[in-house]
Image: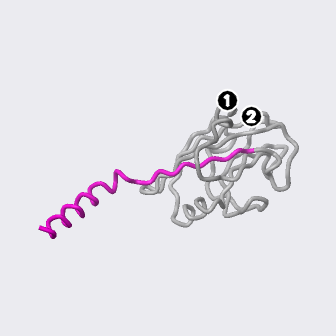
Amino acid sequence: MLRHGLLATALMLGLLSPALAAKQQYHAILSGKSEVPPTTTAGKGTLAATLDTTTKTLDYTLTFEGLSGPATAAHFHGPAAPGANAPVVVPIDGPNPTSPVTGSATLTDEQIKDLQAKKWYANVHTAANKAGEIRGQVLRGPLPKAKAAAKPK
């Protein structure tokens, strides 16, 4: 009887595990003061992202406005703590992205580990700020409601 109960529980957990796939939310608030070195800009932006840990897929929406000119590129960079720079790990869209940018990327286990450790940032580049005009550290959790309500169009 006990053996059947254990078997039934194991089967049930095995069948339910795909339904319990972890979806983790991430966000970033992008500004010129977060760039390294900081930039003087009226530009601002937000990033909302969801990581599916089963498929290793990161879905994201990046919005921005008020830049010194058209965006020339946007990327996720890492691994880096706030105040440090790092190479591109995932390009966002392609050359000359326009807001809003939506997309997805399949991440490696190492990239997921760095993302979960808050070692990624997103930034948007312009001709006047080739290294990046606005930047935001990617943090765990949904976009704060006040920022979500005021996010650029």
> Looking at the image, is mark 2 or mark 1 earlier in the sequence?
2
Q: Which mark is residue 71?
A: none
**Mark 1, residue position:** 153
Residue in the foreground of this view, choosing between 28 and 77: 28
Q: On the picture, is 109 further left or further right than 84? A: left
* Main secondary structure of the magenta stretch: helix
Q: Position of residue 136 (x, y in %)?
A: 72, 49
Q: Which residues are magenta?
A: 1-30
Q: Quadrant of the C terminus?
A: top right
Tell me the element at label 1: loop
Neighbour class for label 1 at 10 Å: few (<14), some, many (≥20)?
Answer: few
Q: Circles 2 and 1: CB distance less than 8 Å?
A: yes
Q: Quadrant of residue 146?
A: top right
Residue 65, numbered label? 2
Point out the residue furthest to the right here.
Answer: 40
Q: x and y percent of residue 12 in the render?
A: 24, 57
Q: Is residue 118 above or below residue 92?
A: below
